Amino acid sequence: MIGYFLITAPSKGRVPLTMLLILFFTLEGTVKIFLAFMIRPLVRWEQLFFNGFTSLLLAIIVWAGWPEIASWVLGLIQGINILFMG
């Protein structure tokens, strides 16, 4: 459905794509934090925890300013996530 919106009307497609990105970052952050606590006794886990925390924080920030920032936040969020992933 999001692909249909992106093909037919790109201006309408950015809102569902931003919502999908919020969902992705929420799930990614939750899984990374969970994995960081799972591997804590074995290896260094701080970087994985920090990456999960920043993903959750970005999802919360986008959700807080939801309809107004849907047009420009896609590139910014993805760039910040890639920067922290290394």
Image: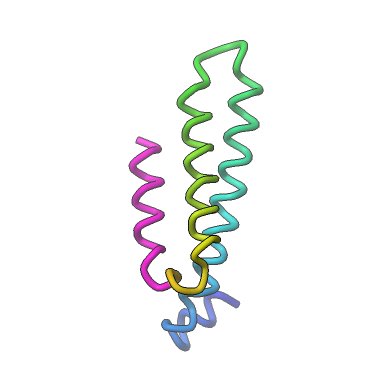
**Image: 20 above or below 14:** above
Q: Residue at x 36, y 48 (%)?
A: 80
Q: Residue at x 42, y 82 (%)?
A: 10
**Image: 46 above or below 82:** above
Q: Which residues are magenta?
A: 71-86
Foreground residue, 72 or 31?
Answer: 72
Number of numbered discs overlaid on the protein picture:
0
Instruction: From the top left corner, tell me how far across and down residue 26 is, in percent.
Output: 59, 50
Q: Main secondary structure of the magenta part?
A: helix
Instruction: From the top left corner, tell me how far across and down residue 6 is, in percent.
Output: 47, 79
Instruction: From the top left corner, tell me how far across and down residue 82 is, in percent.
Output: 37, 45
Q: Residue at x 63, y 23 (%)?
A: 37
Q: Residue furthest bottom?
A: 8
Q: Residue furthest front?
A: 64
Q: How is the image coloured?
A: rainbow
Quadrant occupied by the C terminus: top left
Residue 31 is covered by the magenta coloring: no
Instruction: From the top left corner, tell me how far across and down residue 33 is, in percent.
Output: 60, 33
**Image: 26 above or below 20:** above
Quadrant occupied by the N terminus: bottom right
Q: Residue at x 34, y 51 (%)?
A: 79
- Left or right of 8? Residue 28 is right
